[in-house]
Image: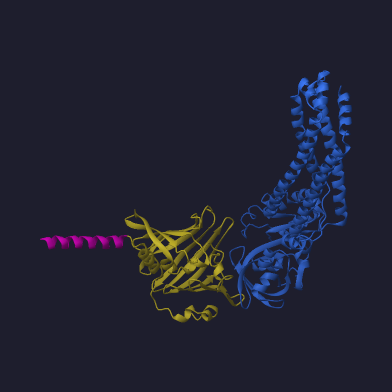
Amino acid sequence: MTSTATTLAWRNIWRHPRRTILTIAAMVFADTLLVFMLGLQFGQYSMMIDNSLRIFTGQMQVQASGYHDEPHMYRSIPAADKLAQRIRKQTQLDAVSPRAYGFALISSDTRTIGAQVSGVDPHYEPRVSTIPGLVKQGRYLGGRMDNEIVVGSILARNLKISPGDELTLLGSGRDGSIAATVSPVVGIFESGSRDIDRQMLSMPIDTFREVFSMDDQAHSIIIGGDRDQADRIAAAAKAALQGNEDLLLLNWEALLPGLKQAIQADFTSAWFMYAVLIVLVAFGMLNTMLMSVLERTHEFGILLALGVRHGKLGRMIITESAVLALTGMLLGMLAGGLLTWYFLVNGFTYPGMEAMSERFNIPSVFHPEVSIRSLLPGPLAVFIATLLASLYPIWHMRKLRPIEALQAV
Amino acid sequence: MRINSFLIFVTLLLTQQSAAASGIDAKGIIRDAIDHFRGLTSYSEMTMTIHRPDWERSMSMNAWSSGSKKTLVRVTAPPRDAGNATLVLDDNKVWSYAPKINRVIRIPSSMMSQSWMGSDFSNKDISRTDEIVEQYDHTLLRTDDIEGHKVYIIESIPHEEAAIVWGKEISHVRDDYVELEHHFLDQDMQTVKILKTLDIQKKGGRMFAVHQRMNMLEKENEWTEISVQQLDFDREIPDYLFTQSNLRNPRE
């Protein structure tokens, strides 16, 4: 039974080879485009995330509960250096660095500006942040106890200072006492993130602790490492936190919710475009199938007169569509996968990306992603839309009655 | 007869108007409250206590004020903070001195709403100039009777063009010009913080709010209290006190 329908379907497909091939080609083209675009997008997103996190945030952070929502100085991590050491041991990762933050009035000879001061460990900071490597003038911080400062480039410009000048800091310490110090500027960094360059300066963590009355505390322990290994690192870090109910481990989604939202918004708007593409291909398929059904009205009439059921004809038509759609999907995935793979190996860039790379802080060459989530969704959506499009010709065919169909030309 | 009744009518009208005017002169009440608080000059010794969920800290300080704009505050204890001082010369001219670094820093006007020495008071709050009188529109919302006193509840909305961070402020002023409560509301008219008077005593020859607490809303555990131990009004205070050089090298 089924085999006759299948045989007929197979023959019908090759009745007009050119039409069939064109239809498949349209699907392959759409699928290739979808696979490639998705791969490109995912590659771009992961680059964006990595680069944003690499500047300052790190892959995850340990913080006292409540600090992230309301960063009050007294919400700190006690014995932070020991805890950081324990996390390094548990995660077998060197990229673990404690940080303390405070707010102070920063005064040069001519200007006073409010800015965030971060106390960092000069030894471990380069492993969780790109800032130490982005010092454009002077040098980065030396020892943990040194009294010195590095300043963001825009802040330095606003304060009208250069390396060698002194800055006066005036703020309040963790215990509410007055925090004040005079420190020489040893370097000016340009992180590429305007926010950071405009409102941040760093000093060695032990100096910071002395000025801001922090003892051995910190506000955050930054954990770097590879994002592919985030789950393993998170589990190990959690183990190191055992017994500290007041401390939380925050992943990048929690630390930078804006980045995640931007990605989601971009992804949603991209899918509107993809939907248009998918609908266009589906209409192409609808056209092909409708034509092939209409031109066979006479033929269907004969089959119906011979006693073939509508159901069997329907199965035949759907088989034709399915073969076309499946061929299109497989070839599309193959072509798209190969195209993406080529750029995965060789890197991808397009005009205007220089400007974008500055804005989103991504390198001007990036590598698209080849994975199930980039390969499957597009072609699968085209496949389903195509099958749905073949329902109309079937519905049309079911209305045929043998006599009228035989009379049709 | 006709003239007589006309005169009576006019007299009635005039008295009514003046009664109405004195009854709802909200701006006058605010001005009087500030004058009452500052005097011509004032000298006070007080303690500020900052309370947080896991710690509490007190500082002793002396304060001088002159006229409606000038204020000098100098921390006297604990030793770690002693010598830190703040000078206010105008609505937006505030300098801070830290002895540890021996520097005077002008607080930029963008920082006026930031916390003053880690407390719940802002740099703006401590200056407490008469800025509110002229830069705001004042309306009497209602008059309450509390313990034999009339209390005027006055709403003050900053002028459109005034550089004020608040959406409005609401003051509860007793008829002897002691302020009982002061509410600060943001631009969305949500209350942000409330200054409450906890104790009123006769000090320096007048009834005075000697114990006040500033409370961030919805944070029962975070507040700053100021209690006044010593208060002296209208004594002679030399003008050189309110200079940057005196801020750095105190002569008194």
Bounds of the magenta segment: B1-23
Q: Residue at x 87, y 44 (%)?
A: A334
| Quadrant in the picture for residue B197 | bottom left
Is residue A200 at least partly visible in the picture?
Answer: no
Query: Which one is nearer the viewer's eye here, A308 or A319?
Result: A308
Query: Which one is nearer the viewer's eye here, A375 or B133?
Result: A375
Shown in blue, the chain is A
State whether the magenta stretch is mostly helix, strand or loop.
helix
Question: From what the image shows, is residue B93 above or below residue A398?
Answer: below
Q: Position of residue B89 (x, y in %)?
A: 48, 75
User: In which quadrant is the N terminus of chain B drawn?
Assistant: bottom left
Magenta highlight on residue A130: no
Magenta highlight on residue B4: yes
Left or right side of B28 for A144: right
| Quadrant in the picture for residue A197 | bottom right
Q: Residue at x 69, y 60 (%)?
A: A218
| Quadrant in the picture for residue A223 | bottom right
Q: Residue furthest left?
A: B1
Question: From what the image shows, is residue B138 above or below residue A315?
Answer: below
Q: Position of residue A126 (x, y in %)?
A: 78, 64
Left or right side of A194 for B129: left
Total numbered labels placed on residues in the image: 0
Query: Which one is nearer the viewer's eye here, A369 or A136?
Result: A369
Question: From what the image shows, is residue A311 above or below residue A284?
Answer: above
Shown in yellow, the chain is B
